[in-house]
Image (tube, rainbow, N blue to C red):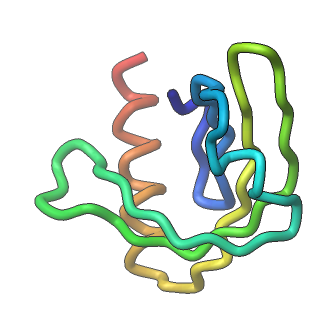
Amino acid sequence: GSKNLSSKGVKFTTKTIENSKLKDILIGDEVSISFPLPGINSNLEIQRTIRNKSHEEEETGFGIEFNDKNAEVIGMIDAYIIHVKDYT
């Protein structure tokens, strides 16, 4: 699951699965993924660059920098973060 999120990037971990394609992802690779944010009707799609990777027996972690310059998408992430901070 996601460990932290900002308009600049995200750090997340996932369970390591034997023979998974996760091992093929390298630092510097550009990836395009989509994810939901509560309160938004569709998934956000963002271009990202892998900036760091950690691998343990049961978890693989990725630090991903957003390269998407779409001000609307970045604004939605910022608004979500502000909203969550108001309730924590």
Please tell me which residue is depicted at 84% across the width and 43% down the height of the picture.
Answer: 53
Question: In the picture provided, is 32 more to the left or to the right than 61?
Answer: left
Q: Hey, which quadrant is residue 77 in on the image? A: bottom left
In the rendering, at what x and y percent does residue 37 appear? 30, 48
The residue at the far left in this view is 41
| Front residue of 75 and 5 | 5
Question: In the picture provided, is 12 more to the left or to the right than 2?
Answer: right
In the rendering, at what x and y percent does residue 41 appear? 11, 59
Q: Hey, which quadrant is residue 72 in on the image? A: bottom left
For residue 18, above or below residue 65:
above
Question: In the picture provided, is 43 more to the left or to the right than 59?
Answer: left
The residue at the far front in this view is 19
For residue 84, above or below residue 22:
above
| Front residue of 16 and 63 | 16
For residue 9, above or below residue 59:
below
In the rendering, at what x and y percent does residue 79 appear? 38, 54
| Residue 71 in sight from this viewpoint | yes
Question: In the picture provided, is 1 more to the left or to the right than 41?
Answer: right
Please tell me which residue is depicted at 60% across the width and 49% down the height of the picture.
Answer: 6
Please tell me which residue is depicted at 66% across the width and 55% down the height of the picture.
Answer: 9
